[in-house]
Amino acid sequence: MINYNLSSCRTVSGCNEAVKKLYSDMHAVTSREASEQEVLEYCRKAIRDRTGYHGKAYVWAPLVPLRGMGSDAFCAVVMIPTYIITGILIRAYTDYESVRTVPDIRRTIADALHACALNGLHGHGYEDYDGLVSAMEIFAECGVDSFIRSEPDLCPEFTCLYESAKEYLRNEVTNSTDSCKFGGRTHAEAAEILSKLSFDPEGNELLFVYGTLMRRQPANSMLEGCRYLGRYVLEDYALYELGAYPGIRPFESQSVPGELYSIPQSLLKDLDRYESEGSLYTRTELEVGNGFDNVRAWVYVYNRDVFTGMIPSYLLPYRSYNPDDYVWYVSYGSNMLKERFMCYIKGGECRFNGRHYRGCDDRTPPVKSFAVSIPHSMYFGYSSGSWDGSSVSFLEPEEGGSCMGRAWLITRDQFERVHTQEGAGENWYNLPLSLGTIDGIEAVTFTHDTKYEETEPSEIYLDVVKRGMRETEEIPWAAIVPVRS
């Protein structure tokens, strides 16, 4: 698990352990061992913890005095953490849409790159070359090269310095007769880093994978030693579950996320054999992108017809979600408003009624939400202490009529916690209702088993319901497919 805590270090000696932890966090992010939610929270904390440096620049530093710090210590306890965190932010920004929506993320990256440029990417004294190689090694792992090629004007000073640093390393590796310069980093290490910075080294092919060849999937070992280039997306294709493996087929307006690799050309024969190329799959060159860069890469396309089993794009990448663990909670009334519903997920005080909610043990936000039509009429009844004793929303227990609802895709455990917080007792929402399915996943809600007398809700409660309806009208609609016995 990754957890940002650099600012907790208060001694220079403690910084060594903090830097080790940062390297470990970086590896977890680039290998995608860390979950998207962990990475998102990490980035938010890092942005809050940034420190101003020489005007329009940000660095990350422990809680030690920077004034009067020697240049060697400054490189070790300020610039190395700054290189690592800048790399993490760039990699997260490239890989995750949720990170790209974090306030101030682009400005923070731009100003952090400016700080890197001010320092020149070099170490101090006889460790000058070591510092440069270490910085470029961090940037290579985090995919900074690809980011800079797609965003050269985000921080022009860094772009210029970065390209100059690459050229300097090339000259040293090519022309130097020594195995290394002063310090400990060798030219062989620099050459290896340069090969990683080359997006498509000579003799290599680009491969886009979306299923069992992805990281943490059973066949990923076939790509051992190949360079991982990050998360990319294939547009106008859909992913289908075929049993032990998936396949993709053309499908306008759908998209398939996956991973891009640079692989030796010789590996294609083994991959063709694994994918039953020509029988089950056809290796096709298609365009994939990551929001910044579009490249052409080999993709294995399933070449047989499929009619069922399409995996919704919001449940991708492949096997990142188990549909059996999820349920669509079909809300109505006040729970259509996201701010109010998230009180049940994250806990805390609801500003509309002043009540404090415990929240769920798993506070991960819903995967997706849709506007839906519920095949039951809604009414206001009973008396809720949470809303000044006024009536609240219920569904008539028997089918008939319809009302607007909002379906939230959450885990089954989260659904049980939400139900408990809403009130599952005899006087409250004691009747679970299975409404059908959305994209093959069960859609459920709850109400009271008998209809209460209808009464007027409070103005505050009615305002929350209206806000939720307006918000729901702005999101995509989905059909609930009834399950007929």
Image (tube, rainbow, N blue to C red):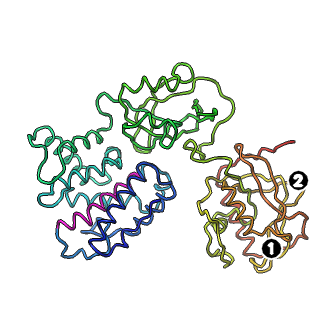
| Observer-nearest of 202 and 270 | 270
User: Is the stretch drawn in magenta largely helix, strand or loop?
Assistant: helix
Q: Position of residue 449 (x, y in %)?
A: 89, 63
* Residue 332 covered by magenta stretch: no
Q: Which residue is mark 2?
A: 399
> Residue 322 location in percent, x, y?
63, 47
Callout 2: 10 Å neighbours few (<14), some, many (20+)? few
Look at the numbered disc 2 and give the secondary structure of its residue: loop
Residue plotted at (25% across, 59% down): 116
In the depicted structure, whether residue 339 falls above or below residue 311: below
Q: Which residue is mark 1?
A: 457
What residue do we see at 42% from left, 53% from top? 28
Disc 1 marks which amino acid? Pro
At label 2, which amino acid type do we have? Glu
Q: Percent x, y for residue 339?
A: 63, 66
Q: Is residue 412 left or right of residue 389?
A: left
Q: Which residues are magenta?
A: 71-91
In terms of sequence position, does the residue under pointer 1 or pointer 2 come before the other? 2
